[in-house]
Amino acid sequence: MTESLVVGVDAGATSTRVAVHTLTGTRVGYARAGAGNPTAHGLAKAVAAVADALGPALGSLDGARVVASVAGVAGHVEEMVPELAKVWAAHGISHTPRYVDDVTVGYAAGSAEPEGSLLLSGTGAVAARMAGFEPAAIADGLGWLLGDAGSGFWIGRRAAMAVIEALDRGAPVPGAPGQDHPDAGDVLAGLVVSHFLGTRPPDEPREAALRVVRLAQADPVRLAALSSLVGRAASDGDPTAVEIVREAADHLMATLHRVHVSGPVVLTGSVLTSEGPIRQTVVELLAGETVTTAGDAAGAAAWLAAREVLSEADARARHATFTTAA
């Protein structure tokens, strides 16, 4: 007998992933494509990214075998639904995928419990209380410009601000000709300057600060990449980095506490799934809670699709198989 298939989509601000699974949870297809957030990148680009991943994920598999699909999309735009239906039809899939937001698949990537909370910190930051695998309350997630406290962008911006302020006050430029290797109090400055200006920055502090500012203004979201450098600097004892880590963790906890009532807390997003002082601090602050870490979100979307045709007991038993990255 030909096995039925389910399809899961995780379309985010930086990449799109499509997973194809059997109902037992076995992954039989997987592919990645470009950014799939229709709010950030436009409807046409988002739909194209999903299409670019769906084709390779299915490969030679017959689309008629697909019995359920879930598309988790960051930046919810209802106009995407009929467009995805066209993409699915082009591959012989007879039904439109169920369209949910990325919060839903992010939570399902870390828990088979229908009630609980999600705490996400990646480029952005958001917390959600989940009821029946649907968001019942949302906190933050207001975007990098005005919200997302404790996110990778927030962390990176705080780091860049601290460094350019020090340079504007005449602090030596780390890595400039004639400058000594930074000590434990200047590790963050060295990492930030190197990230933006390379290994031979200008030796005049204000010129270095202005160059960092120009580069950050040209591509603000680039600041999010500094979050991992803040973690490195904090691990090396840089006091500014240690302070930023603590502030970020406090912001994330405050956001979570606005929505969390009971059940597991699922950590997701690159800031909270990567080992380092930021994740460690958040986990310590969550002492007493059941804390899990999200696995593969595209596989979680496929699991949510499988729940539509499986018994509750079978779905729970197969959750780990769907969400464990291959």
Image (cartoon, helix red, strand yellow):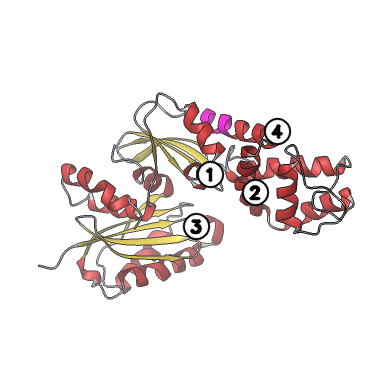
Q: Which residue is mark 2?
A: 226
Amino acid type of the residue tagged 1 in the rendering: Val
Measured in 3D between alpha carbons, the distance from the residue under mark 2 to the one under mark 4, in whole angstroms, is 16 Å
Q: Which residue is mark 1?
A: 271
Measured in 3D between alpha carbons, the distance from the residue under mark 2 to the one under mark 1, in whole angstroms, is 11 Å
**Residue 20 in the image: above or below residue 278:** below
Q: Which residue is mark 3?
A: 37
For the point 49% across and 67% down, the residue is: 44
Q: Earlier in the sequence, mark 2 or mark 4?
A: 2
Q: Earlier in the sequence, mark 4 or mark 1?
A: 4
Measured in 3D between alpha carbons, the distance from the residue under mark 2 to the one under mark 3, in whole angstroms, is 22 Å
Amino acid type of the residue tagged 3 in the rendering: Asn
Q: Quadrant of the N terminus?
A: bottom left
For the point 45% across and 52% down, the residue is: 76
Measured in 3D between alpha carbons, the distance from the residue under mark 4 to the one under mark 1, in whole angstroms, is 19 Å
User: Which range of residues does the magenta coloring cover?
Assistant: 249-255
Q: Is residue 12 left or right of residue 162?
A: left
Kindly report which numbered mark, 2 or 4, lies closer to the viewer in this rendering. 4
Secondary structure beneath disc 2? helix
Bin the neighbour count of mark 1 within 10 Å (Cα to Cα): few under 14, some 14-19, many 20 and up.
many
Q: Earlier in the sequence, mark 2 or mark 1?
A: 2
Secondary structure beneath disc 4? helix
**Residue 129 in the image: above or below residue 215:** above
Kindly report which numbered mark, 2 or 3, lies closer to the viewer in this rendering. 2
Q: Quadrant of residue 156?
A: top right
Amino acid type of the residue tagged 2 in the rendering: Leu
Q: Which residue is mark 4?
A: 239
Q: Main secondary structure of the magenta part?
A: helix
Q: Is residue 243 visible?
A: yes
For the point 50% across and 43% down, the residue is: 275
